[in-house]
Image (cartoon, rainbow, N blue to C red):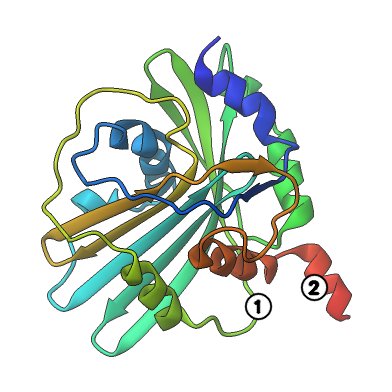
Amino acid sequence: MSRFTIAASLLLVIPSSFSGQQPRASAVNDPSLVAIFETKDAAALTVGLSPLSKARLAKGEREVRIWYSSFGNPQFLVIIRQSGGLTTGRLMLWWDQYYENSPASADTRVDNFVRAGYDCGPISKRDSHFGEDRWISSVCEARIKGRPDWKAFLSEAESHALPQASAATPADEHIEGENWGITVERKSGANYGVSHYHIELMIGAPEPGRGPKLQDMVNALAATARRDAALAKN
């Protein structure tokens, strides 16, 4: 049984939060980036986006992607774009469904779990492979409430940024647990940079203030798309 299959059995039901330990960042040529992006790139392609390291941006455009991956489903992707004086953002929910024989046999319980908990648009799916592992990459866009402060997201993401560098090809090496944490990608023109924060996982309900501020900001944004939050306001 592969490490992805084991992880998939945990992702359906376990909520997640992180301890307050100080995160560390990984440089762009860290070999662990292979493991970090093997499913994230698949999720981006599923909704018609290029991996940010390969995306072409117009002059004066900037894009930041904040990936928040943990032991719970769905995983979160915050996409922020700047073009001139305009700053916009989106929240994507994504998860993987594994299968043994064919894509049609993939378990759909996670789809139902996400739909029950979050208000999101149509679910896009894409059959993906990585070595011996076979999965369906699933993504939907969250219908967030209110008017998020996207510039505040950018400011917080950049406050922990490593110096930007040209995209490098990391070694083909996989490190257990490297998928979990917060990964921040940024691209401006041809310059691409990535920071990954390895944060100790803790099983239990998220507790604001115990992890980095960026984690709290993503959780707060996702909370505006929760169905129970919408019902509480009615």
In this picture, residue 27 sits left or right of residue 106: left
- Which type of secondary structure does the marked residue at label 2 adopt? helix
In the orientation shown, which residue stands out farthest toward the bottom?
85
In this picture, residue 156 sits left or right of residue 15: left
Q: Which quadrant of the structure image shows residue 200? A: top right
Judging by the rendered image, the residue that carries numbered circle 2 is 230
Q: Are marks 2 and 1 in contact (CB under 8 Å)?
A: yes
Q: Amino acid at mark 2?
A: Ala
Q: Amino acid at mark 1?
A: Lys
Q: Residue at x 16, y 71 (%)?
A: 58
Q: Is residue 189 above or below residue 150?
A: above
Nearest the viewer among 179 and 118 is 179
Residue 196, position in %: x, y? 36, 48
Residue 66, position in %: x, y? 42, 59
Q: Residue at x 34, y 71 (%)?
A: 159
Nearest the viewer among 209 and 166 is 209
In the orientation shown, which residue stands out farthest toward the front?
21
Specify which label sits upstream in the sequence, 2 or 1: 1
Q: Is residue 57 above or below residue 8?
A: below
Residue 28, position in %: x, y? 21, 46
Judging by the rendered image, the residue that carries numbered circle 1 is 145
Nearest the viewer among 134 and 179 is 179
Alpha carbon of mark 2 to alpha carbon of mark 1: how far?
A: 9 Å
